[in-house]
Image (tube, coloured by chain):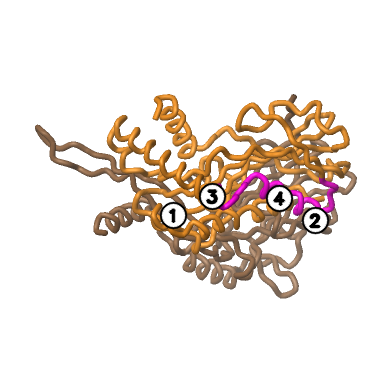
Chain colours: A orange, B brown
Amino acid sequence: MTSRKIAIILVAFALISAGCASAPKQAFNRAAHSSINTIVILEPAPPKEYEVANLGHAGLSFGLIGGLVAAADISAKTSEFTQLMKTRNFKASDEYRDALVASLEKSGYTVKVQGVARNEQDLLKTYSNLDPEADAYVDSLIKTGYYSAAGATDYVPLFRTHVRMVKRGTNEVVYEEQVAYGYENRADKAVSLAADKKYYFKDFAAIKSGADAALEGMRAGIPLVASRIAQDISR
Amino acid sequence: MTLRCSLGVISALVVLSGCMVAGSKQVATGSAALDASTKVIHSVEALSARPIKLGTSMRLNIDVSSEVLVEGGDRRFAVLLTLPQDPSALSIRVSSFQHGTMDDPAILYPELRTLNSRFEVVSSFPHKVFAYRTGLNENSLDAVVFINDRSLDERFLLILNRPVQEADQFEAQANLTNHATVAVPAAGGVAMWMIPTGINLPPKKMLASPTGRLELLAEEYRVRKVK
C-alpha cells in the first residue's frame, strides 16, 4: 500500500468519525418556491468503494503504527466487500437515482435525469450550463457500506446522502440536507433513519458469509432516504 | 468473549451516564402531572402568550408548571408564543429533545399550529414534518415551519404535546464510539491507556411524553446562493 493511499484512508477515517461539521442545511419553503415544477436530478457519482470500517478499531490506541494497521485493515475489508458487491451487480448510485425519480414523481413533480461530469466525489461547484428546462436541480453525494462503533459491536449498514436542490437561474439553494440510514451521522446532525436489526452483522466474517443479506441491508435504506427527501421537498 | 462483554459494559456506562430517568417513567410522571394540573385553560386566547425574539434561541420546558389546554375533552400541555411581525418571511425551527435512557427513550412529540389575531387556526403541521436527528450531544425531533404570507394575519404559534400511537412513533438508535481509560503498569508507575470501545443499540421506538424540553429559533427566511 502506498503512503498516499494510507493518508487518504486516514483522512477518510477521520471524516467518517468526525463528519463534516460545516455541512449546511436548508429546509424547503414550498410556498415560496411553488413555481418549481420540473426537477432535473443530476446523476450522483458512483461511490468508488463500499466501505467497511470499524470506527473504534483497537489499532487506534497504538499511535501511528496502530493507526496504519487500522487503516490497512479497513482498506482490505473495503476492497473485499466492494468486490463482493460488484459481483452482485450492486450500483448504489443508479438505485438511488431511480428511487429518487420515483419518489419525486409521486410528489407531483416532472422529473428528468441529467448525467454530469464530476472531477471529484462531491456536489457540483456550479450549476450553470445544465438542462435549461429545469426549474431546479437536485444534486446528491452518496456513500454506503457497513460501520461498527468498535471491535466488540455489530456492523451496521449505512446509506448516506448529502443532497441539495438549486433553483435554475437564481442559483438559490432552496433545500439542503444530510439524510443517513443505518449507522448514525452524529457530527452532521443528519436526519437519522433506523436500519432493521436483522441487517446487523457481528463481524466481517458474518458480512462475507451473508453477502446477499448485507447487500439487502444497504439496499433497504435507498428508498427510505429517497422517500424522506421527496417528503421534505414535496409540493 | 470476556473482553467483548467488558468493553460493552464500559461503553454502556459511559454512554448512559447522565440519562438517569427511564423514558417510561417520564411518560408516567408527565401523564400524572397532566391529569393533576390545576392550570387548566379552556380556550386558546386565555393562554398566557410569550413573545418570540427574532434570531434568539428560545428554550421551552414543558412540564408540571405549564398550562393545560382542554379541547374536546382532551387535556394537553400548551405553550402560546407571539410571532415576530417584522420580516416579511419567517422560518421557525422547533426542536424537541430526546429524554430517557437509550434502551427506554421518550420524547415530546410537538403539535404545531399557527393562529391569527382572532386565535383561529391558519395552519397546522402534520406529524411527518418532523425529522429525527442524532447529534454529538443530543438527539431531537426537528421541524422548520415558514410564515410567508402576512396577509393571513398569522400572529401566534401554539405548541401542544401530541399523543402519538406506537405505529407512528420515531425510532431512536445509537452508534457510539468511545474511549475507555485503563490504568496499566509501566516503568516507574502507572500509565493511562485509551482503549477505543463503542456501542450499537438497535432501533427503539420513542415513547410519547407529555413533558419535555424544546428549543425554538425564528429567523428571517433567506437562502444562500451558489455559482
Q: Residue at x 63, y 50 (%)?
A: B142
Where residue B111 appears, x then y in whole percent? Answer: 69, 59
Q: CA distance from mark 3 to mark 1?
A: 10 Å
Farthest left residue in view = B188
Pointer 4 local density, CA inside 10 Å: few below 14, some 14–19, many at least 20: many
Residue drawn at the location 74% of the way across and 36% of the way down: A115
- Mark 4 lies on a secondary structure that is strand
Residue named by callout 4: B81
Image location of residue B113, percent across then percent down: 75, 56
Discs 4 and 2 share one subunit:
no
The kind of secondary structure element at disc 2 is helix
Q: Which residues are magenta?
A: A86-111
Residue contact at pointers 4 and 2, CB within 8 angstroms: no
- Judged by depth in the image, the label closer to the viewer, 2 or 1, is 1
Residue type pointed to by label 2:
Lys
Q: CA distance from mark 4 to mark 3?
A: 53 Å
**Front position among marks 2 and 3:** 3
Horizontal side of residue A134 vs A157, given as left or right: right
Q: Residue at x 84, y 41 (%)?
A: A33
Tell me whether marks 3 and 1 sit on the same chain: yes
Quadrant housing residue B84: top right
Q: Which residue is mark 1?
A: A208
Pointer 2 residue: A106
Please identify the quadrant where the C terminus of chain B is shown.
Answer: top right
